[in-house]
Amino acid sequence: MVSVRSDGYLPGTVTKSVKILVVGSFGVGKTTLIGAVSEISPLRTEEIVTQVSEGVDDLAGVDDKRTTTVAMDFGRITLDDTLALYLFGTPGQRRFWDLWEGLAEGAAGVLVLVDTRPGRLEASFEVFDQLEIGTELPFVVAVNHFPDTVPHSADELRTALDLLPDTPVLDCDARDRGSALAALTTLVQYAVDTSATGPADAPQHLPVSQEMVS
Amino acid sequence: MTPPDDRSREYRDSALRPYVLTKGRARPSRNTISVDTLLIATDPAPPLPISAGRQERALLAMCRGLLSLVEVAARLELPVSVVRVLASDLVDSGHLTARAGSPRSAQLPRELLQEVLNGLRAL
Ligand SMILES: Nc1nc2c(ncn2[C@@H]2O[C@H](COP(=O)(O)OP(=O)(O)OP(=O)(O)O)[C@@H](O)[C@H]2O)c(=O)[nH]1
Ligand SMILES: [Mg+2]
């Protein structure tokens, strides 16, 4: 494990960075999960996006780009001497899609947090709409468990969320570092597996299945 | 649905700031700096022109060590887009060195994903 400098700077040997998006509806646990795994105190920053007009056409002839600033969380894990992983937490609501698309470009994948409690699952639907329409990124679904979360099987959830049969669905506790890391590991394993069958120039051998040690 | 906590409200007054700070430009001169692009002051650093603003000086001082664009923005308490523009100029002028952030490709190279996986497993 790479030790973290007290001033928060990365080791000078780091040359590459990779990002993962953590998305989900309001209050689902995005900030909590990033804070649980980040080596730097979780940070918030703002990004400027063009405001999504809600069904109203912009006034013709007005050369006024409407921008708004939205907050995003991020965290960092230095994975080895040359590689840093960044996690970005973004809300799933439609009005944040601009921000999301900017972040999604070049990302390794998306961890989708869902809250399956009655009345909460519906808020995740637009997140999945966006994943299907806006990106081709690999994603896995992590059910964040709250005290009153009723357990559902992965298949029940795939049906409820209209997911493909091979989309990984797992349980997680966003407050727990090990649990959050396991979710990220599942995502990256899935990204590796699907990349093998992706572009024509990729090696076509089957990935060796590796049991996760928790 | 009403969001329980609309934090974007905190920043409502800042929409004009970027255009002032970046002298009217909303876009970086080069489109290569992403949120996770790593930045570090060039060593030895050429002196900044006397015309350089406070934000440029603060950015360069912050980059005495290696940080991503988004970390620099958070530490300077400036929007990412603003710091992106300032950083692009400082890269162009040779004051700042950028190391590749996420590639702008649809899918990451498999070897890179495997390295991430190995790194996560080793934590
Ligand atoms: N019991 C339990 N509570 C959790 C868990 N994860 C988050 N919480 C709590 O749920 C609340 C919301 O968590 P956040 O991490 O702020 O959620 P968020 O997705 O970042 O929320 P927004 O940024 O407002 O959209 C907080 O009070 C957390 O302490 C979990 O795994 N279990
Ligand atoms: Mg949050």
Image (tube, coloured by chain):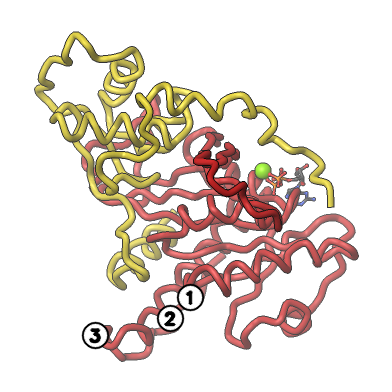
Chain colours: A red, B yellow
Residue of label 3:
A201
Nearer the viewer's eye, disc 3 or disc 1? 3
Disc 2 or disc 3, which is closer to the eye? 3
The residue that disc 1 covers is: A190
Question: Is residue A162 among what the camera can see?
Answer: yes
Mark found first going from the N terminus, 2 or 3? 2
**CA gap, disc 2 to disc 3?**
13 Å
Q: Quadrant of residue A152?
A: bottom right
**Where ligand 2 lies, by quadrant?**
top right
Where B18 falls versus A28 (above or below)? above
Mark 1 closeness class: few <14, some 14–19, many ≥20 residues within 10 Å: many
At which x and y percent is residue A88? 52, 49
Name which residue type carries label 1: Tyr
Helix, strand or loop at disc 2? helix
Asked whether the residues under the numbered discs 3 and 1 touch, taking CB atoms below 8 Å apart as contact, a structural biologist would say no
- On the same chain, marks 3 and 1? The answer is yes
Q: Position of residue A110 (x, y in %)?
A: 53, 63
Q: Which residue is identified by label 2?
A: A194
Residue visible at 31% across and 29% down in the picture: B86
Q: Give the residue type that dot 3 points to.
A: Asp
Q: Please report, as a chain letter, where disc 3 is located.
A: A
Query: In the image, is B62 to the left or to the right of A176?
Result: left
Q: Is mark 3 within 8 Å of ligand 1?
A: no
Residue A145 against residue A136 in the figure, above or below: above
When the figure is inspected, residue B54 is found, relative to residue A61, above or below; the finding is above
The chain containing the residue under callout 1 comes to A
Q: Do discs 1 and 2 belong to a common subunit?
A: yes
